[in-house]
Amino acid sequence: MLDTGDDLFTREDPIFANKELLEISHLPGEGRIVGRDDEISQLANAVNPAIFGQSPSNVLIYGKTGTGKSLCAKYVSKRLVETAAGEGVEAAFAYVDCAQDTTETQAVQTIAEGVNDPDETGIRVPDKGLSTSTYYKRLWRILDARFDVVLILLDEIDKLDDDDILMQLSRAGEAGKIERSKLGVIGISNKIQYKDRMDERVKSSLCEREFVFPPYDANQLRDIMEARSDAFREGVLDPSTIPRAAALAAREHGDARKAIDILRYAGEIAQSTGVPTVREEFVTQARERAETDRFRELIRGSTPHSRYVLQALALLSLSNQRQDGFRTSRVYEIYENICRQEGSDSLSLRRVRDLLKEHAFLDIIEQSKHSGGSAEGSYTKHRLLEDPEVVKEVLTENIDG
Ligand SMILES: Nc1ncnc2c1ncn2[C@@H]1O[C@H](COP(=O)(O)OP(=O)(O)OP(=O)(O)O)[C@@H](O)[C@H]1O
């Protein structure tokens, strides 16, 4: 017999009313984007010509992780498509996560599939099985059949294997591959030195406009979290929880993703422990989990050598408690050992210095300059900011996975 009074399961979530608001993939509406008015209007300005069916400027957006780069790029693109439609211009945007689609073929397939409507064009874009040049040919046909203007968002553009797709996209018009459509590329990266690695020709056409998104301060992070507090049921959120999470997240990185993660995890802790409110004290534990996630996300899709360099620093930190870090030469020595173990040729010292700089930009490590006096000259020391155990754990699962 059906027991309608079964109390084995809880029928209503006691903590969350609308948890999707705290999912990272959630795209907040206009009123919920905090502290990015200037960046949004500069971006809008760069792509504005698309509204009249003209070529938008190509843009490169830099900034540390969680500074709202992807969010603002998607938001502006979405608004652009809507406004263009009002002007009788057919526009669209395609989004590519280059950490996932690292090869030219994968990226062009994702773009073609994203802008296609097989019922309208009669063109098929299978997941795989076609040559790169066939994917391009289909993409050009789809674009000309459907759109006056298309924006292509290449998120984590530095993770692409090479510049080939950038070359194709930036020259499609002048090479006569597309006739009707105009293309604009918005590249997004958290590697400030990415541009230095680009082919000169690609650089000159792709970097027409560049923007750097700064980290958020505690007030902005608080506002970002407050704007999503309706993710929780009324009265469940302790009033001091958000300010505490904002203060912590701002002190460490000014990263909105981490702030939102902390809030979601704090809610999950309340949920799993059966406590009816999301207390301030849950923030500490939630922060540790968010930090591990953040690191995992930061190294997602990174090159093996970028990981070996971190592994070297983690090994040094675990075997030696020196607080002020390790000199480049010492890190390089351990890095070379790791390369040997992995059966991989080591990169030059200069390249390893660059990789260390990239890690420093993302606050994974901290660098300090020292003067060794006239005999030694000056040198740099590197210190891991992440917990070395976490680094070791995540790097191992990354290699195994
Ligand atoms: N200004 C903001 N207002 C509201 N939410 C924000 C804001 N900035 C970022 N977020 C949220 O924080 C999370 C991370 O933002 P986003 O993905 O845009 O960062 P990013 O700079 O592209 O980071 P990454 O380099 O790691 O990809 C997303 O869930 C986003 O919705």
Image (cartoon, helix red, strand yellow):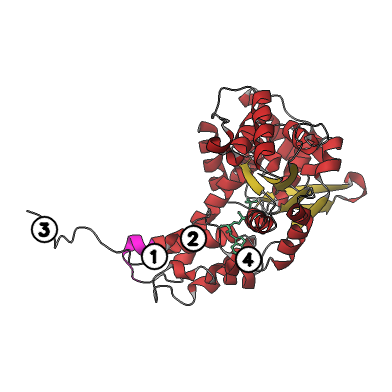
Q: Label 4 belongs to which residue?
A: 250
Residue 78 at x, y = what percent?
63, 55
Instruction: Mark 3: give few (<14), some (14-19) or many (20+) Cα within 10 Å.
Output: few
Residue 167: image quadrant is top right
Identify the secondary structure beneath mark 1.
loop
The answer to which of 365 and 155 lies nearer the viewer is: 155
Q: Is mark 2 within 8 Å of ligand 1?
A: no
In the image, which disc is placed on residue 22?
2
Q: Is residue 270 magenta?
A: yes
Q: Label 3 belongs to which residue?
A: 3
Ligand 1: image quarter: bottom right
Tell me if label 1 and label 2 are in contact, CB under 8 Å.
yes
> Magenta segment, principal secondary structure?
helix
Distance from disc 3 to disc 2, alpha carbons, whole Å, reads: 35 Å
Distance from disc 1 to disc 4, alpha carbons, whole Å, reads: 25 Å
Instruction: Mark 1: give few (<14), some (14-19) or many (20+) Cα within 10 Å.
Output: many
Q: Which residues are magenta?
A: 269-276
The answer to which of 261 and 104 lies nearer the viewer is: 104
Q: Label 1 belongs to which residue?
A: 16
Q: Going from the N terminus, do you reach mark 3 or mark 2 first?
A: 3
Q: Amino acid at mark 3?
A: Asp
Distance from disc 2 to disc 4, alpha carbons, whole Å, reads: 18 Å
Instruction: Mark 4: give few (<14), some (14-19) or many (20+) Cα within 10 Å.
Output: many
Q: Is residue 176 magenta?
A: no
Q: Residue at x 61, y 43 (%)?
A: 299
Residue 93 at x, y = what percent?
65, 47
Q: Amino acid at mark 1?
A: Phe
